[in-house]
C-alpha cells in the first residue's frame, strides 16, 4: 500500500474558538494524548524516557501502534526493522521507542529538533518544582520546503484555521500534476487540522499545527510547518501561551553523560530523505567531548562507529565514566594503579581506536 501525502502550510485565518485555561496534565488527559512527560535529569544529563515492549493485535498496523503511543513513522520502523508495516500479525513483539536525548539548547518554551522529528515542550516551572519536559513526534518540511532553523516565538493561536496556500505552493502542486484548492476551509479536510500556533518565521507562514493525515507524522512531508498528531496538538495548544519562545534546531548527533554512562544518538540529516550518509566523525567526536566535559570516560569507538553508521535515532551506550560514584554513595579511594591512570587519562580515551578509523 502506498500513502498519498499532501504537504501543508501557508497563510491561515482565525475562524472561531478560544484557548482553554487548563493545566498541562489536565490538557493531556482531556485530549487523550499519549505524549511522553518526563522529569529532567537532575545531574545535567539529557537522556529521558524508556522503551516499552508490547504484542500487536491481529487488526493492528505498525502505524496504528505508533499513533497510540505517540511515536512517529520512522521511529516505529527503526525500532522494529523486521516487522511488516501493514501486517505485524497477532502476538508479534513490538518495541515502542521511548528514549530521547534532549537537544543541548536552553530548556525554555518549545524546542524542535528537525532530524529527530521531535518537539520538546518545557512548561514554565514555579520555584522548587521539578522541571519537566513533554515530547511529541512531528513532521517537518521536506526538500526545498525545509523548516527554517532559528529562534522565534508564538505570536498567535489559531483555532479551526483556514488554510490559504501560498502562490508558490499552488504552483508546485500544479507542476506535480496534483492541483489543490486555493482555500481550505476549517474542517476535517483541512491539512492544518483543528489547532495551529503561528510563529514569526517566514513572515508568519510557519505554524505548529495538526493534520488530517496522521499516518505521515514522523516523516518530512510539509511545506515548512511543524505538524503533530491531532490529539497531540489538541493537548499542546491550550497550555502554550502567546509569546512562548520557539527554538528550531538541526542537530542530527546527540550525546549525553549521566549516571556514569555515555549515550550517543545519531539521525540521518534532514536533507537525506532519511537515508544514512557517511558519518562526520570529527563532528561526532566534538559532540562527545562536549557531553563528557572534564570527566574521565572510557569511550568504545567501535560502538560509536556502529551507532554512527546505522543512524537509526536510537540512543545507545558507547562509554562509561571512570570512578563514577552514584549520589549518596561513600567516596571511593583514589586509584593507585599507574596503568589505570594512563588508560583513562584525558577527557576520554579509547581502547579500540579512533572514531574515524576505517
Image: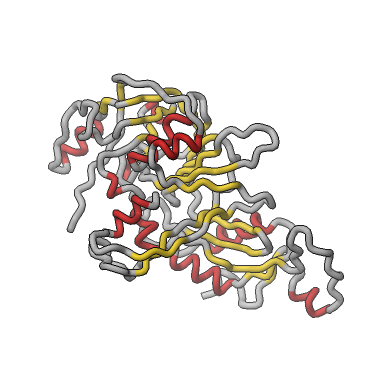
- Left or right of residue 8: residue 268: right
Q: Is residue 353 above or below residue 226?
A: below
- Left or right of residue 110: residue 64: left
Q: Is residue 195 above or below residue 1?
A: above
Q: Position of residue 109 (x, y in %)?
A: 54, 34
Q: Position of residue 110 (x, y in %)?
A: 50, 37
User: Quadrant location of the N terminus?
Assistant: bottom left
**Colour approach in the figure:** secondary structure
- Left or right of residue 246: residue 68: left
Q: Position of residue 45 (x, y in %)?
A: 64, 53
Q: Position of residue 80 (x, y in %)?
A: 37, 66
How many labels sit on residues?
Answer: 0
The residue lying toward the viewer, choosing from 284 and 312, is 312
Residue at the image point whose x is 64% and y is 42% from the top = 130
Residue at the image point whose x is 34% and y is 50% from the top = 67
Residue at the image point whose x is 36% and y is 41% from the top = 228
The residue lying toward the viewer, choosing from 170 and 259, is 259
Picture quadrant where residue 178 is located: top left
The residue lying toward the viewer, choosing from 57 and 100, is 57
Amino acid at each position: 500500500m502506498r500513502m498519498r501525502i499532501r504537504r501543508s502550510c501557508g497563510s491561515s485565518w482565525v475562524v472561531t474558538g478560544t484557548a482553554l485555561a487548563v493545566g498541562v496534565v489536565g490538557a493531556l488527559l482531556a485530549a487523550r494524548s499519549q505524549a511522553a512527560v518526563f522529569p529532567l535529569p537532575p545531574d545535567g544529563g539529557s537522556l529521558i524516557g524508556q522503551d516499552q515492549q508490547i504484542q500487536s493485535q491481529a487488526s493492528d498496523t505498525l502505524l496504528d501502534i505508533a499513533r497510540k503511543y505517540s511515536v512517529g513513522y520512522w521511529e516505529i520502523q527503526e525500532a522494529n526493522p523486521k516487522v511488516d508495516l501493514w501486517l505485524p500479525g497477532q502476538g508479534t513483539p513490538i518495541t515502542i521507542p521511548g528514549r530521547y536525548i534532549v537537544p543541548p539548547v536552553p530548556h525554555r518554551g518549545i524546542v524542535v529538533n528537525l532530524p529527530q522529528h521531535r518537539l520538546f515542550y518545557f512548561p514554565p516551572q514555579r520555584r522548587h518544582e521539578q522541571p519537566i519536559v513533554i515530547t511529541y513526534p512531528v513532521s517537518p518540511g521536506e526538500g526545498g520546503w525545509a523548516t527554517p532553523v532559528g529562534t522565534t516565538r508564538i505570536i498567535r493561536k489559531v483555532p479551526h484555521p483556514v488554510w490559504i496556500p501560498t502562490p508558490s505552493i499552488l504552483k508546485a502542486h500544479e507542476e506535480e500534476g496534483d492541483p489543490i484548492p486555493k482555500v481550505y476551509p476549517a474542517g476535517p479536510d483541512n491539512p492544518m487540522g483543528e489547532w495551529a500556533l503561528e510563529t514569526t518565521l517566514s513572515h508568519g507562514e510557519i505554524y505548529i499545527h495538526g493534520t488530517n493525515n496522521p499516518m505521515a507524522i514522523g516523516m518530512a512531508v510539509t511545506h515548512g510547518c511543524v505538524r503533530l498528531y491531532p490529539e497531540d496538538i489538541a493537548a499542546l495548544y491550550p497550555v502554550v501561551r502567546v509569546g512562548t519562545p520557539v527554538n528550531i534546531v538541526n542537530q542530527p548527533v546527540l550525546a549525553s553523560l549521566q549516571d556514569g554512562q555515555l549515550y550517543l544518538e545519531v539521525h540521518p540529516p534532514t536533507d537525506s530523505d532519511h537515508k544514512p550518509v557517511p558519518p562526520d566523525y570529527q563532528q561526532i567526536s566534538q559532540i562527545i567531548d562536549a557531553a563528557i566535559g572534564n570527566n574521565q570516560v572510557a569511550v568504545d569507538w567501535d560502538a560509536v562507529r556502529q551507532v554512527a553508521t546505522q543512524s537509526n535515532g536510537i540512543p545507545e551506550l558507547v562509554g562509561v565514566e571512570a570512578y563514577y560514584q552514584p549520589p549518596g554513595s561513600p567516596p571511593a579511594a583514589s586509584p593507585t594503579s599507574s596503568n589505570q591512570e594512563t588508560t583513562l587519562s584525558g577527557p576520554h580515551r579509547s581502547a579500540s581506536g579512533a572514531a574515524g578509523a576505517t
